[in-house]
Structure formats: C-alpha cells, structure tokens
Image (cartoon, helix red, strand yellow):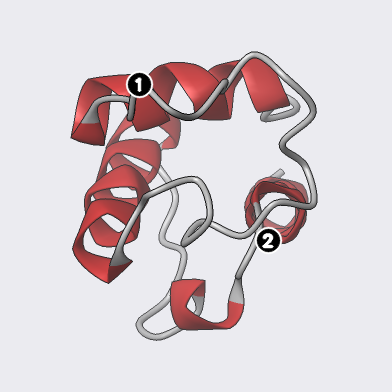
Amino acid sequence: MSQFTIQDLRRIMREAAGEDASVDLDGEIHDTSFEDLRYDSLAVLEITVRVERELGIKLGDGETDKTQTPREFLAMVDARLTQAA
C-alpha cells in the first residue's frame, strides 16, 4: 500500500471500536478530534495496532498520543510508509 487514505482509516475505526450513532464518520472528519468523534485513547490505541498490523509498519510508542485528528493520524502513517519504502 503506497498511501493510507481516509477511507482506510474510517474502515479500521469502525472495525476497531465501532461507531457512535451521533457521529457521521462518512462526513468531513479530517479536522475533527478523535475525542469529538467519540474515540477515547484506548480506541485510538486499538486503531493504531490494527494499522500497524495491516500495513506492516511501526508507528512508535507515544507517537499516536500526538495525533489529535484523523488528518494528523493520516500524516503520521503516510510518513512511516514513506520511510519504509
């Protein structure tokens, strides 16, 4: 996989932690905080583990703590994919 997209992230978010009925993950979520999307730190950790497994990369301990939005998470994953290439 050369790029990790918002569609990929949405799928993994749903698989890892479900979806709150009050949140539209199919809407514009790039700059919405994970907290506002109803994903707590444990859910983000589960998402991270699944991304690492699926893509065969290591995102780094504590790296995901710095990502507050899907846009920041995607940038972090894409940076790791570029380094791995």
Image quarter in which the C terminus is found: top right
Tell me residue 46's x, y (percent): 22, 50
- Which SS class for mark 1? loop
How many neighbours does mark 2 have within 10 angstroms: few (below 14), some (14-19), or many (20 or more)? some
Q: Amino acid at mark 1?
A: Ala
What residue appears at the point 63 percent right and 51 percent down from the top-left corner?
77
Q: Residue at x 54, y 29 (%)?
A: 9
Q: Is residue 48 left or right of residue 30?
A: left
Question: Residue tagged by mark 2?
Answer: 76
Locate the N terminus and report the quarter of the image it occupies.
Answer: top right
Q: Is residue 26 above or below residue 62?
A: above
Residue 19 image-quadrant placement: top left
Kindly report the distance in space between the C-alpha atoms of the residues bearing marks 1 and 2: 27 Å
Residue behind mark 1: 21
The residue most toward the front is 22
Q: Is residue 66 left or right of residue 44?
A: right
* Residue 53 at x, y percent in the picture: 28, 38
